[in-house]
Structures are given as C-alpha cells and as structure tokens.
Image (cartoon, rainbow, N blue to C red):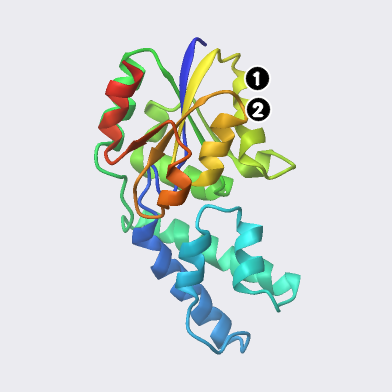
Amino acid sequence: MKQAAIFDMDGTLFQTDLILELSLDDTFAHLRSLGAWDGVTPIDTYRHIMGVPLPEVWAALLPDHAEDMKELANSHFLKRLIDNIKNGRGALYPNAKEILVYLKEKGVAIFIASNGLPDYLAAISRYYGLDEWVTETCSIQQIQSLNKSDLVRMILKKYAIQTAVVVGDRLSDIQAAKENGLLAIGCRFDFAKDDELVQADWVIDDLLEIKSILM
C-alpha cells in the first residue's frame, strides 16, 4: 500500500463523550450496590485520563481496590458502553463518514488504531458500518506492550505501508506518528488538550480539513 490514514477512534471518529458518563454512572451505581463504592462517580478523573488503555483507567479510578473488583468494573463498563452504542446513544463526529468516503475514493487505505477493547470497537464499527471503508480496526489489546506506537508499527509492517498520517486527539496518537516517522494530525475535539496538540504537525477542528492537508 502506498498511502494510508490511521485514525484513533474515541474522541476522533466516535463521540465517546455521549455515552461515557452514562456508562460510567451505571458502572459505579453497580459498585455502590455491591458496597464497593460510596462516593460520586469520578467522571472528571476519567475525562482527564481519557484515551489511555483501560487497565490504566481502573488503576486511576479504583486505586485502592483489588484486581478482581477492577475486572468486574471493567466488564460492567464495557457491557454498558456496548449497550449504549447498540441503542444509538452515541454518534460519529460531524463529517466522519464523509472523510472516510473521500479517502477511500482517493485510494488511501484507512485503519483504526485504538486503545479501546476489541468488542467495543466492533460494536461501533457494526452500528455505523465503518467496515465499508476501513481496512482493519486494531485494538491495543493486540500488542503486548499496550503502546499505541507499537500498534501503529504493527499496521505499517503488516500492510507494507509506505507513507501515512495518524489522526487523533491525544498525545499518544501524536507520539505514535512521530515514533514511526509519520505525520500527525491532531483533532481539537472533546478530550483534546492544547499542550498535547501543539506537538502535532497539523491541528484540525473538522475532519474534512484532512482533505486539504493530504492534497
């Protein structure tokens, strides 16, 4: 493959914010019912770390809990996320499908490299029909290191990609581009931070801006 675009999912293509608080509230309500939590849902903490692999999420949200309780919370959270996706409570960002259609028509191979779990990513892809344009959706769980740079490297090697851009909203996406010699496009969307985006080669406010960058 000559050219590719590698997208993050949460906060880049998919508006995770629409289902995040619902799913997290349900999860911590479940923990309260088990007597394992007695405070408010730590939504602000999660927003601050949004984009990291889920093991890091539960280490931050439940630092004093045993591993089996973190696993229980993770399982419940994932189920609620998927239920909310299937019930249409989420959404793609404006012009997400339009840019995917455009890139495919131009012969650009499209990939998703996400810190999300495979079942979660599959639910989004199925509901919004992303497989029509996306060559492969890859989860950080496919990489032992749980490092997005390594996940992007795997995609480049597997498909013999010569040039690519990485599109994402967080520092891990920008680093994944830089550490693989690729160009980074930062999305100034819900979870983005200006001090991270400044390290990208371009910063966009609308996915359709990718057209002019690639031209």
Mark 1 to mark 2: distance in Å? 5 Å
The percent coordinates of residue 57 (x first, y second) are: 60, 62
**Amino acid type of the residue tagged 2 in the rendering:** Met
| 135 in relation to 16, above or below | above
Residue 27 visible in the shown view: yes
The percent coordinates of residue 147 (x first, y second) are: 66, 42
Query: Residue, x 65% and y 27% (percent of image)?
Result: 154
Q: Callout 2: helix, strand or loop? A: helix
Residue 31: which quarter of the image? bottom right
The percent coordinates of residue 6 (x first, y second) are: 48, 29
In this rendering, position of residue 23 left or right of residue 188: right
In this rendering, position of residue 15 left or right of residue 9: left
Query: Residue, x 44% and y 48% (percent of image)?
Result: 10
Q: Name the residue under label 1.
A: 157
Query: Residue, x 34% and y 49% (percent of image)?
Result: 189
**Amino acid type of the residue tagged 1 in the rendering:** Lys
Q: Mark 2 points at which residue?
A: 154
Residue 69: which quarter of the image? bottom right
Residue 150: which quarter of the image? top right
Residue 135 versus residue 5: which sits nearer the camera?
5
Instruction: Kindly indicate whether the residue at mark 2 contacts the one at mark 1 (C-beta within 8 angstroms).
Output: yes
* Label 2 Cα crowd, 10 Å radius (few <14 / some 14-19 / many 20+): some
